[in-house]
Amino acid sequence: MNTSLELLRTEQLTKIFPGVVAVDAVDFDVQAGEIHALVGENGAGKSTLIKILGGVYLADSGKIVMDGREVAFASTHQSQVNKISVIYQEFNLVPDLSVAENIFMGREPKTAGGALIDFRRLNARAAEILSTLEMPLDVRSFVSDISVAQRQMVEIAKALSYESRLIIMDEPTATLTEKEVRKIFEIVKNLRERGVSIIYISHRLEEAFELADRITVMRDGRKVGTKAAAETNKDEIIEMMVGKVVRDYFVKAGAAARTDVPLLEVRNYSVADAVEDISFTVHKGEILALAGILGSGVHRLLQSLFGVIPKKSGGVFFEGRKVEITRPRDAIRLGIGYVTEDRKNAGLLPAMSVLHNLTIIIIRALSLLRGLFIRDKEERRRFEGIRQTLDIKTAGPGQRIIYLSGGNQQKVLIGRTLLTDCKALILLEPTRGIDVGAKAEIHKMLRALADKGLSVIMTSSELPELVNLPDRCIVLYKGRKAAEFTRETMDSEKLVAAQIGHAANDGGARP
Amino acid sequence: MIRFLKLYEKFGIFIFIFAGAVFLAFATPNFLKLDTILNIIAQGSYAAVVGYGMTLAVTSGGFDLSVESVMALTSVFLAILIPVIGIPLAIVASLLVAAFVGMLNGLIISKLKVNPLITTLSMMTIIKGVALLCAGGKMIVILQKQFMSIGTGKLLGIPIPIYIMVVFFGIFYLVLYRSSFGRHVAAVGSNENAVRISGVNVDVVKIGVYVLVALTSGVASVVRTSQALIGMPSMSPGFVLVALTVTILGGTSLTGGRGNLWGTLLAAVFISMIYYGLNLINVQIFYQMLSVGLVLMLALFIEGLRLRYLKAAKAKGIKV
């Protein structure tokens, strides 16, 4: 490829966060008018890289060269002035404003006096941009009323209104339907024809191959390599993504841990807009992982099993009996615990102490006279029990939960469910956002609990956790079962392949 | 400094009370008399009792603007019912009416998911209208003189309202700090989603909170109505602001999750002291209102500084 066509390149770009090198000496380049796919596992550094290009983070070292000149973006505004637009997964749109207002936010055409917005011109110009993209969308509709795919289009239109030469899209299709994905593809290809460069981040490999001219793979903050899409294949890319996953870095199952006694059976289970016709069984003392990337429906499936969101159809059998779980209380009564992936918004009680955070789930049962008088000593005793079992490090029961480390907060949330003496535990992203040491501790703890007979159903977006922790791993792709692995058949490359929809050569023990 | 700030979080209101007391003691010789002090406390009792309810509501992450209308409605019902069914039954019936209004608040907020501000604001207007309708638009004189003893009587030399204030403090202390319901209330104020996932029936908790707030308004109204011997359909305009003031001044976090009942009690006494004390030294009522507003602003200002200082200290790695 001719270097004179280069739009942007990074040289030895590095960004360090406390405890982790997020982007490690990356040389990356984008040609004018190309679609460049950026792929890699979670935590590979893709997001940090695009945030540096978008002016959210300032690189610690290395440089960015655009049109042969060295540039640095200290703010998102500077990045925008240099004709770069980033479309993040969480859109940057104001729901209560119209499509047109969002596109020209802060740059609305004014009336003659300059005081008022000229809505006629505003709407006309917005409609003009949308029509060049062949987007049938009323510019006067509120953003809150349009679909996710349409919001994506508004973001693209906004980028075009800045006459952006580089548009960076972070997993644009993760939550879209097949039809909407086709539409976005058309638009992206249309942009390329107009000479706009695209950096396209996706977890779905087939998309990268369909769209991209070149594919860059990142892993652990480093760039593994860049390939022309025509000269590589999915297997090679997957190999580059996965590298070598260290096996056996977690504690192995105890010899007689897993039993064949079924505890929880899920039959033909469907959740609206998430999963279709899923069936699986969890045995006593087993750790089962349900793996799947964003958009696979795994999170919603697990939330539905606990009664957080409703199911569409299907049955659940617990200890051989058919049960109906319509709200969390039903699940807790049966003996199912749940640890959220969203500690901050659905787990912690930030204003309260460690003790109160832990015992909230059983406080009524801990009290005399139907909840009238809390038995302090009993509460402390239960707290001590969990603190010792899970080795929670806290200054004392009265310490505010928010002053604990992420790992210890997570232990408190796991401890909370254990207080209910549950038989099954649903864990979403059990080690998200906590440091490596605490991760290993939590893995060890989960294994120990399973060895004592607790059944664990977990999901994780971290590959080592999926490869090493569970006894079995079921992979979901776009709401359907794509593959299943046991400890014996587990293979990190095949696991990744199944997760990103490349299950053609899945060698797992598929039922 | 951090130690001081922590102490301030717990006992800040004492500093205000102490400073106010010293000032008034110097300003007027009448201040440091047992009668004066008892009077001040008794005058603060309504604000304290309604403040307990408000503290509970704010701890749950909401609040209740309808308290003064509930007081008015209770007052009207007392005046209407006392001649018909006698004093004790009339009190019970009026409190039930108050509790019913609270239940409506709770149902609308929890089941229909309407914002507490809007719900209780509408309820305030509606109930005020209902009270005026029931009373036919005028005050109703109560002829049964015995009823007066609740608000003006004394037991062992101490006014009855003080006993009521203390007894309700005890009840609310148990509810908020010693019962599982109180723990649920604080948890709902701290993070409603987390509580729901923990299997707690959040709707029931919220309904309970608003019933209790309405009950405190009813009790305060019984005392006031008894003092005046008049059913007042427009009782205590603006009283909701007093109830909110004592709650916030007392140190209950407006973001929910942390209620300070002691603070509410002391703040009620403090506000009463300002009104009564400034009255003693013949300061005009306008200045009294002005000074209460200023004190509230000062308290919030110090609170803001405190939080910023603690945050800065934490950023620097100082353990707090």
Image: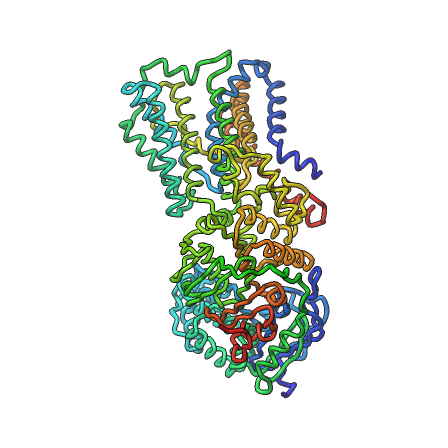
In the image, residue B89 above or below residue A420: above
Residue situated in front as seen by the camera: A156 or A297: A297
* Quarter-of-image position of residue B13: top right
Q: What percent of the width, then of the height, locates residue A323?
A: 41, 54
Q: Which part of the image, by quadrant, shows the C terminus of chain B? A: top right
Q: Does residue A110 appear in the picture of this structure?
A: no
Residue situated in front as seen by the camera: A148 or A262: A262
Numbered label tally: 0
* Quarter-of-image position of residue B89: top left
Residue situated in front as seen by the camera: A74 or B108: B108
Residue A108 is left or right of residue A31, and the answer is left
Residue situated in front as seen by the camera: B68 or B63: B63
Q: What percent of the width, then of the height, locates residue B112?
A: 37, 47
Q: What residue is rendered at 42% in x and 22% in y?
A: B223
In the image, residue A484 above or below residue A338: below
Q: What residue is rendered at 55% in x and 77% in y?
A: A507
Q: What percent of the width, then of the height, locates residue B68?
A: 40, 31
